[in-house]
């Protein structure tokens, strides 16, 4: 009977469990209490899923071959290699980086820094690491690129792309604490995947050739327009034809006015010479034979208008009257007579007055000619300025004509290559449905509940785990416990027979539960 008890390990384990049942029960209750608090400390995360279906590939038989040939379309089933290729394209770093960059520029995605990053890592990197890198190397720190790389790494860690076994459907799962960000990321990633895949299908050499030609001519058009604007800005020109026409009209008008002023100047110089000559004759002439014109020509040589110098006319008329009086008195009286000498003396005085008057007229004519010379010089300078401006406008007009000619040629070439490029691209896009065998089966939608934590699952797992932990620790406690709890332990450990078993009436009562750490530990292990 004793040997059967010693070999019954199940009974021994049950004995150990029942012996340590208070400790196991308390430890289990402690684990249950902790598990009830676990959902409150686990971060809530949402998993958003999008699905992409990969259809069978259609065999191309030429452009519109199915219609012209009259044969039905032929398809190739999708292989595991094709599915893996599509998975790799979705997980590719460039596609992920492009998606993250788009969402970052739109303000949807951003890095959330913790307290350590805010107070230690970022200041250390900004004020110490980046300046040292700038001194050692020429590479400039790009904050946007670093942020995008960090977001891309986080997205790769949270992204799961898998193929549903036995189907041609690819699931795109993204887990994030922010369901709005996750929704935008999954949908944008699938959209960019289709765009990238279509670009790979449409990216052929002829299209690329026409595209490069179109872009080169477009750049040349822009450069020619800028060259034209720079040319007009350099010479301050708005419209060469209109401005040149106005300049030529101004030159013609100024030339006409200059000719009139030159005629006036010539006429004034002629009269000035005449007055000076007459003044010399007047000074040397006899007072009894004084004669002087008092009417002068008009504003030009071709003018028939004359003006009369009233003051000079009165002076000449006085002299003529005195000359007549002197001649009459000389015939009737003697030479020494008062009747003769008085008019003669008056004639001398009037001659002096006439000389003074003529000198004044000469001075006036001289000043007038100086004014005319000044006007002529101003007109000549203005005409020279107009002519130089006209030469500049002619040069600008010639350059503009060359630019316009080249613009016309480049514009025609740009239109030609653009048309060919768009025609080829439209034809490819029209056949893109036949070329592309990938479709978005379902876009991601907002989840109704978070994927983690699930309270019931957390509680069940916590209860099971707590039970295993409590039993395990109970068994471990028994290994280090040297007390005898049942009679079979005495002969097994001391090799002594058990004669009788007495219950101890002085058993210490169980210690009450206490929330203090020391008392709680004593309560737990008793």
Image (cartoon, helix red, strand yellow):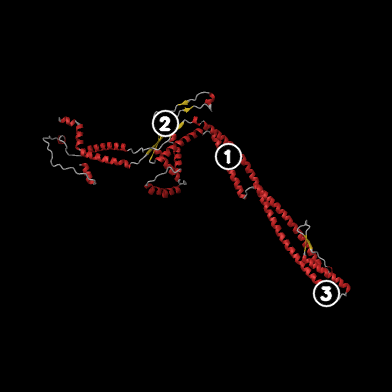
Q: How many residues crowd mark 3 within 10 Å: few (<14), some (14–19), many (20+)?
A: some
Q: CA distance from mark 1 to mark 2?
A: 45 Å
- The residue at which mark 1 appears reads as 217
Q: Measured along the vertical axis of the image, is residue 301 above or below residue 18?
A: below
Taking the spot 21% from the left edge, 32% from the top edge, the residue there is: 10
- The residue at which mark 2 appears reads as 169
Q: At numbered mark 2, what does the secondary structure look like: helix, strand or loop?
A: strand
Mark earlier in primary sequence (1, 2): 2
Q: At numbered mark 3, what does the secondary structure look like: helix, strand or loop?
A: helix
Q: Please provide percent x and percent y for residue 471.
A: 24, 37
Asked where in the image residue 227 lies, by quadrant, the reply is: top right
Mark 1 vs mark 3, foreground winner is 3
Q: Please provide percent x and percent y for residue 75.
A: 47, 26
- The residue at which mark 3 appears reads as 342
Taking depth in this image into account, of 62 and 434 the one nearest to the observer is 434
Position of the N terminus, as image quadrant, is top left
Asked where in the image residue 29 lies, by quadrant, the reply is: top left
Q: Please provide percent x and percent y for residue 260.
A: 74, 56
Taking depth in this image into account, of 483 and 115 the one nearest to the observer is 115
Q: Is residue 22 left or right of residue 143?
A: left
Taking the spot 56% from the left edge, 38% from the top edge, the residue there is: 214
Q: How many residues crowd mark 2 within 10 Å: few (<14), some (14–19), many (20+)?
A: many
Mark earlier in primary sequence (1, 3): 1
Taking depth in this image into account, of 85 and 25 the one nearest to the observer is 25
Q: Is residue 395 visible?
A: no
Q: Residue furthest left?
A: 499
């Amino acid at each position: 009977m004793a040997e059967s008890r010693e070999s019954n390990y199940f009974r021994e384990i049950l004995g150990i469990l029942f012996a340590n049942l208070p400790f196991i029960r308390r430890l289990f209750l402690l684990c249950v209490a902790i598990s009830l608090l676990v959902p409150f400390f686990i971060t809530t995360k949402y998993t958003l899923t999008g699905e992409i279906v990969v259809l069978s590939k259609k065999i191309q038989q030429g452009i519109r071959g199915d219609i012209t040939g009259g044969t039905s379309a032929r398809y190739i089933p999708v292989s595991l290699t094709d599915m893996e290729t599509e998975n790799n394209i979705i997980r590719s770093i460039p596609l992920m980086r492009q998606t993250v960059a788009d969402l970052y520029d739109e303000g949807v995605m951003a890095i959330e820094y913790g307290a350590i990053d805010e107070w230690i890592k970022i200041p250390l990197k900004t004020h110490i690491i980046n300046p040292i890198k700038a001194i050692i190397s020429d590479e400039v720190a790009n904050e946007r690129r670093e942020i995008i790389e960090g977001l891309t790494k986080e997205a790769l860690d949270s992204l799961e792309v898998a193929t549903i076994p036995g189907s041609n459907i690819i699931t795109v799962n993204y887990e994030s604490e922010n369901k709005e960000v996750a929704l935008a990321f999954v949908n944008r990633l699938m959209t960019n995947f289709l765009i990238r895949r279509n670009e790979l299908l449409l990216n052929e050499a002829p299209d690329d050739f026409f595209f490069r030609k179109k872009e080169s001519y477009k750049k040349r058009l822009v450069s020619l327009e800028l060259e034209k604007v720079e040319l007009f800005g350099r010479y301050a020109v708005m419209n060469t034809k209109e401005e040149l026409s106005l300049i030529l009209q101004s030159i013609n008008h100024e030339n006409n006015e200059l000719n009139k002023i030159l005629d006036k100047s010539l006429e004034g110089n002629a009269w000035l010479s005449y007055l000076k000559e007459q003044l010399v004759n007047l000074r040397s002439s006899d007072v009894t034979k004084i004669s002087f014109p008092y009417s002068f020509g008009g504003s030009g040589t071709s003018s028939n208008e004359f003006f009369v110098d009233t003051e000079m006319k009165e002076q000449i008329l006085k002299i003529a009257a005195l000359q007549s009086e002197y001649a009459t008195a000389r015939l009737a009286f003697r030479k020494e007579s008062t009747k003769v000498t008085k008019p003669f003396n008056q004639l001398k005085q009037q001659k002096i007055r006439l000389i003074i008057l003529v000198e004044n007229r000469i001075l006036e004519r001289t000043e007038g000619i100086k004014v005319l010379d000044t006007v002529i010089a101003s007109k000549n300078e203005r005409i020279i300025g107009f002519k130089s401006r006209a030469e500049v406008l002619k040069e600008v007009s010639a350059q503009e004509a060359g630019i316009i000619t080249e613009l016309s040629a480049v514009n025609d070439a740009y239109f030609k290559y653009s048309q060919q490029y768009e025609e080829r691209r439209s034809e490819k896009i029209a056949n893109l449905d036949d070329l592309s065998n990938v479709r978005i089966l379902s876009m991601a939608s907002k989840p109704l509940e978070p994927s983690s934590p699930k309270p019931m699952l957390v509680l069940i797992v916590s209860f099971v785990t707590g039970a295993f932990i409590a039993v395990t620790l109970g068994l471990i406690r028994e290994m280090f416990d040297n007390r005898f709890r049942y009679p079979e332990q005495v002969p097994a450990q001391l090799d002594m027979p058990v004669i009788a078993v007495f219950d101890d009436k002085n058993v210490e009562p169980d210690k009450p539960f206490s929330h203090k750490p020391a008392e709680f530990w004593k309560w737990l292990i008793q």
